[in-house]
Image (cartoon, rainbow, N blue to C red):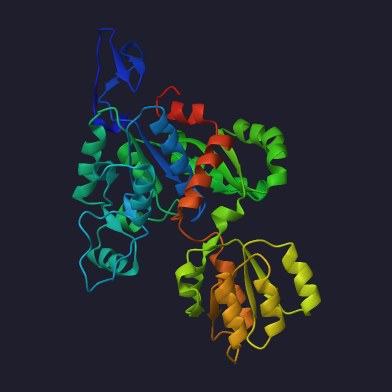
Amino acid sequence: MGSGSGFFWSTIQVKLPIQGRYIDSQQGPLELVMGSTLLIGSCEPFSGKSALVLGLARQLSAAGHAVRFGKPLATSLDWSGVSAPLPDPLIDDDVRFVGTTLGLDESQLIPSLHLLEPGTANGRLASGSLDAGAGFERLREQLRADDGTVTLLEAAGSLHEGLLYGLSLGQLARGLDASVVLVHLWQDSRSVEALLAARDQLGERLAGVVLNAVTPEDVEALQQRVVPELEALGLSVFGVMPRSPLLRSVTVGELVRRLDARVICCEERLELLVETLSIGAMNVNSAMEFFRHRRNMAVVTGADRTDIQLAALEASTQCLILTGAGEPLPQLISRADELEVPLLKVERDTLATVEVIEQAFGHVRLHEAVKATYAFRLVEEHCQLDRLFAVLGLDR
């Protein structure tokens, strides 16, 4: 409901329906109603916003509610750059994936107003304008049309990201008069400081938080001890989601891109997901024992370590990455091809290769169907959906 969209006083008791609820006019000013809109934000990028969007949107659809989704500031777009015009409509790749996964109609995908990337940032800075532009008012009008559709909007990666475009989380919350749910990575009690800063910045528009990537064995203790303490600080906790190796995983294709690797075999298997990283620098007996306890690995080893390479192929290996000088032996290529394990060659040394791969884990978009399926279950099992529905003025 939009307090910024104008109001009038009434001396007559009137009850207005708002998403299944009523507001009594004697309790204060009657306001023009903006349809149910929820902003999903975070204090830092790659905190799990898309997972919450997917899970919540699926539950809303299952409950019979029409859902639309968008990202006012696009951050994920396969665009060739300044030599080509921006697509029109500007649909973020994350939005497209959510729409495809949930079977949303094109009309249920809300176009972005701006694209966050160096070229557009240069243009915004040069223009001296920090206003979101006319498109923002059109978005307000679209959301103000209360047709029973629930709108989920995903904000940029942090509280401040998007300020240059007039589309930071705080600006969106104020401009659309929308409630905010933050998805927040939880490590320990120090993690609360960012949430307190968000509470101070967003005020009453911060409806609550979902704690994500919690060490699985800490979930119960967190729910019993820490959640009540956070609630006492005015931070409503709508869920505690455990860390998932699957959601943090990266495709072999993404590793090829980041490493600028040469694919020697099994190029058709680059969609395989890598959950763990192993370095083949030990003797072969130790390596075999180590590999036995790992799953869905990327194994990085020197191009001259054929013994390690062959041992890795017999384990739960999603790709084998060879570093340094030299080329793989024909029998290794043949065996990798037989087992359908992509074989990659990089020019970097082992240490540099490992650093690139470690940076990739947990810093990739959620664009795989298997991850979406897991996100559905994660939200259903670990979030308080009744409370999330209530933020939207809905009964579950």
- The residue shown at (28%, 10%) is 14
Q: How many numbered marks, from 0 up?
A: 0
Say which residue appears at 74% left-offset and 64% top-offset: 292
Whole-percent x, y for residue 328 in the image: 59, 87
As drawn, 187 above or below 396: below
What is the residue that sits farthest to the right in this orientation? 285
Q: In this view, does 267 lie to the left or right of 152?
A: right
**In the image, residue 44 lies at what x, y percent?**
50, 54
Residue at the extreme bottom of the image, as rendered: 326
Relative depth, front residue between 366 and 10 = 366
Q: In terms of depth relative to the viewer, which is nearer, 326 or 158?
A: 326
Question: Residue drawn 54% across and 73% down?
Answer: 342
Relative to 214, say whether 289 is above or below.
below
Quadrant of the rendered structure where residue 129 is? bottom left
Query: 2 or 6, which lies in front?
Result: 2
* Quadrant, the C terminus: top left
- Give the answer, above or below, for where 233 lies relative to 28: below
Residue 235 visible in the shown view? no
Q: Work out whether residue 129 can be spotted.
A: yes
Look at 24% across and 39% down and name the residue there: 140
Q: Position of residue 74 (x, y in %)?
A: 33, 56
Tell me where residue 219 appears, x and y as whole percent: 68, 41
The residue furthest top is: 12
Q: State which quarter of the image contains the N terminus.
A: top left
